[in-house]
Structure formats: structure tokens, C-alpha cells
Image: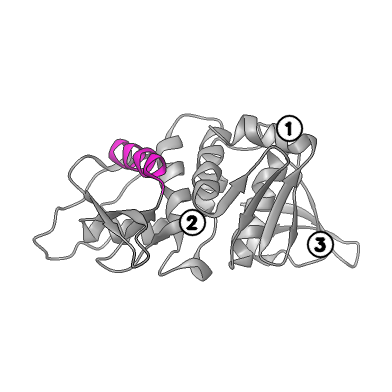
Amino acid sequence: HRFRVLTKNFKVEWRRLNNISEGDLVAIDNRVGLFYEGPTQEVGTRAYESYQTTHYPFNRKVKVDPNLGYVLGCMASDGYVGKYKAQFIASDPEIMRRMETAWVKSFGKNLHSVVESKTPAGTRIWRLFCLSPELDDFLSSITGMRGYAKGKYLPDLILQAPAKVVCAYLAGVFDGDGTTSSEVARLDSISREQLKRVQLALKALGIKSYTKGARLTVTGEHLLRFKKLVRL
């Protein structure tokens, strides 16, 4: 996916997102509709490596819809993807309920387990574990994730999806790493690539934001649009 860029040397070029540098100006339409709006896409999984295991197999096509968008957004916030070890952690039972509902609609009922426990401080938390190494590998392949926050970013698969899928992804990200009040919405991430991609997605939805350090912020009239489109 390429963007039209005005470089520091005032040259207009088409560049992929990972080739855009600080100081480049990106031309993006403010109107909703920038994203793909055709028939629902599907992602096949048969091409991914299958492990010899007694775990539940995962061998199906997955729709690129708001359910998958929300799952990937949650995984990009409080999730971990590693070989045989994908999991999502939440301290809010409502967020876990939404995550599990979206997970089941995307991947089916038999590929996960939710366990409740307590931290040493006594805080209740819920963990959703992936029970399929094939699904773990699939999540890593489409998101580029292997590990925790530094390796997480909004994947091209979502960036090129319909606007409603992008909004669902952003809802998952903000549910995990964000805070929203009557005056401001903030997203914290140590992944600069994630903040840059989220900012571009918001811009394409007509929502202006600014970043400082490891934080992205939305305020003013754009906060109202953010709540309308993203806080589903």
C-alpha cells in the first residue's frame, strides 16, 4: 500500500509506509472511504506451516471483518504472539468478553481457553490462551508480531481493509493501551511504528491527532468524531 509523499526536498513520491521518514508530508483524504470497500476479504491459512501436534488444528479461511479487526487490535495492545504461546490479558471482564466474542466469530469455539487468576497484588485478571500452534503461526504471519510491544504495529492487512474493520482494530488497541475521557483520548505505546500507523489510520478517518514521545493524543472536535467512529 503506497502513499503520496512530499519529501523534505519538495519532491512528490509514492512510498510504502515503512519508507516514510520524519518530516515527510503525506497526502491523505480526510473523508471516510479511503479504505477498501469491496466484498469481504478472506485470508487463507493452508499455506502456513502445520506443526505435528496434539493441539487443536486450525485450517480454515478467516474473514477480514470487524471481528478480526478487534481481535488483532486487542493482541496489539495487551497480547503476546510467540510459537505455541499466543495469549491476551485483560483486567476488565467486559473487555475480555468482547475479545472472546470476536475471537469465536473469527476462529471458532475450540481454539482458545479463558482462565481467571489474581496478580500478587490481588488484582483479578483474565487470560485468553490460543490452543492451536497453527493459529499462533497465522497470527504472527499476518501481523508481524513475535513477542511484546516493540514488535507490534497496525498490519497492512488491516490498513487496507474497509473503514469499519480499521475502526474495530483501533477500538481493540484503545481498549488495551488507551484511555478516553470527556476531554481527551490517549494511546500509549513504546512502538513508534505502531503510533505512526495508528495516526495515519486516524487521519484517513478524518480524525486529527498528535504524538509526543510514546503517546498519541486526540482532543477537541476530533475527539467527538473519534468516539463516534472508533468507540463502537
Q: Which type of secondary structure does the marked residue at label 2 adopt?
A: helix
User: Viewer-nearest of labels 3 and 2?
Assistant: 2
Q: Residues within 10 Å of mark 1 (few under 14, many from 20)?
A: few
Q: Earlier in the sequence, mark 1 or mark 2?
A: 1
- Residue toward you, 106 or 227: 227
Measured along the vertical axis of the image, is residue 23 above or below residue 220? below
Image height check: is 103 above or below 199?
above
Residue 86 sits above or below residue 112 on the image = below
Kindly report the distance in space between the C-alpha atoms of the residues bearing marks 1 and 3: 21 Å
Residue that numbered label 2 is attached to? 77
Q: Amino acid at mark 3?
A: Asp
Query: Could you say where residue 162 lies in the image, as x and y percent from the top left?
Result: 54, 35
Image vertical order of residue 78 relative to residue 39, above or below? below
Disc 2 residue type (three-letter): Ser
Residue sitting at 8 percent across and 61 percent down? 54
Identify the mark at residue 24; answer none if there is no mark: 3
Please name the residue that numbered disc 1 is placed on. 31
Stretch of the chain drawn in magenta: 92-105
Q: Residues within 10 Å of mark 3 (few under 14, many from 20)?
A: some
Check disc 1 and report its element: helix, strand or loop: loop
Give how far across and how far down residue 144 sits, in percent.
Answer: 45, 63
Dominant secondary structure (helix, strand or loop) of the stretch shown in magenta: helix
